[in-house]
Image (cartoon, rainbow, N blue to C red):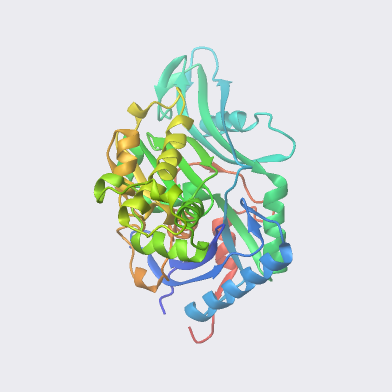
Amino acid sequence: MSELPLFVACDLGTTTFRAVVLEVAPGQTPRVVAGASHPAEGFQDGDFVDMKAGSMAVARLLRQLQDAANIDVRGFAFNVSGSHLRSVMATGQIPLGQGGREINDRDVSEVMSMARSLTIPFDQRTLTVNPVEFSVDRVGGVLEPRGRVGSRLEVKAHLITGSSSVINNIENTIVKAGFEPAGHGVDVLSAATCLLTDEERDRGVMIIDVGGSVTHWAALAGGCVLGVGTVPWGGEHLSADLASGLRIDEDEAEVVKCDRGVVLRSLVEDADVNVLFEQEDPVETPGLVAAILEPRLEEIFSLVKDALGPDLPLSRLGAGVVLTGGGSRCRGSRELCEEVFGMAVRARYLPDDLTDSQRLPAGQWASALGLALWGGGAGPAEDTEPEPAARGGWRGWIRRLLGRSEDA
């Protein structure tokens, strides 16, 4: 086995837990060493509501991963998601002295610290601080202030905060499973790290991740995070709508959605929707499936669009929308998203430059892969809160938490 650095990450999803071992080295294509998945247990809205069930599920997942990768894992990075996340804007400013001088790295670090010092609720912690733009002597729109001369430096920054209680609870559950938490990343930003290109991040792009019970989104432009949010509906709600409309159980509805799901009525032969109300046992047809699923997914996309608000006009998304997540795999999802947003939409589930992706079980791997890439230094340029137990940064710590077996 190669001796290149390995990174382990776990995507704690509402319906499925996924863990991956990724080989990441500068200048080389990332390579999948192994992946494993396990049904989620005791996990709801980004938090473990049953620590015993959750820790047992995590332990089983990591045993599968260790066997598949032939390594000994002592800790891993995990994703943070859920309705407890908050997206806020903050500003910071520092004087540079009368007459002005050239701005250096220390000045940028200091002004970012000022933005981080924004007062937030006592039960929240700052997860990421990402500069949106700088101003030098009130001249705004500066993306890179280093080297400019001025007497005052200001920054407008985007902060993501999360519940301290939720994050501590996840970490305690990981410890109960017999492992060490080795840092965390915001779920949708991890997916963005995995799926978006540098050009898309610069031109302006939105990523929409239609998950099991929720839909996450993030908007980026100029290489910076402009906003993130969550809509409390996802793929499970599409299945529930099918179960109700066709009078079938939810397991059968999930099969219909995955195998024959279509969410745009214009793609199939029209059907008389009155049978859904008049017949006790309506016969499944593509037209009826589309009539049931289209309104729900259209509303999800519309809620995401409305959440952008006046501060994030669609005109800033020059590269359009990237659609991902299991709830977006039904036929017509991309076309429906294009109708709602009025711009180009691309469906994307794995990065193009990934070696041995066939080692991953079926499912949605963008968040787990993004976390591992983040650990390898491929993440967006943002200031993440240092882990108290890892003063050297979680990227360095995670290397010490992962050991190869003697016969690896």
The answer to which image quadrant residue 85 occupies is: top right
* 204 left or right, relative to 374: left
Q: Is residue 144 above or below residue 255?
A: above
Q: Which one is nearer the viewer's eye here, 223 or 298?
A: 298
**Do we see residue 336 in this rendering?**
yes
**Do we see residue 7 in this rendering?**
no
Q: Residue at x 35, y 72 (%)?
A: 358
Q: Residue at x 48, y 51 (%)?
A: 241
- The image quadrant where one finds the N terminus is bottom left
Number of numbered callouts drawn: 0
Q: Which one is nearer the viewer's eye here, 134 or 328?
A: 328
* 366 left or right, relative to 229: left
Q: Is residue 284 above or below residue 138?
A: below
Query: Where does the image place residue 102, in percent across and percent down from the top left?
Result: 45, 24
Query: Where does the image place residue 18, in percent across and percent down from the top left?
Result: 52, 65
The answer to which image quadrant residue 87 occupies is: top right
Q: Which one is nearer the viewer's eye here, 307 or 24?
A: 307
Q: Residue at x 44, y 61 (%)?
A: 365
Query: Where does the image place residue 169, in percent across and percent down from the top left?
Result: 71, 55
Q: Which one is nearer the viewer's eye here, 372 or 226?
A: 226
Query: Where does the image place residue 282, in percent across and percent down from the top left?
Result: 41, 57
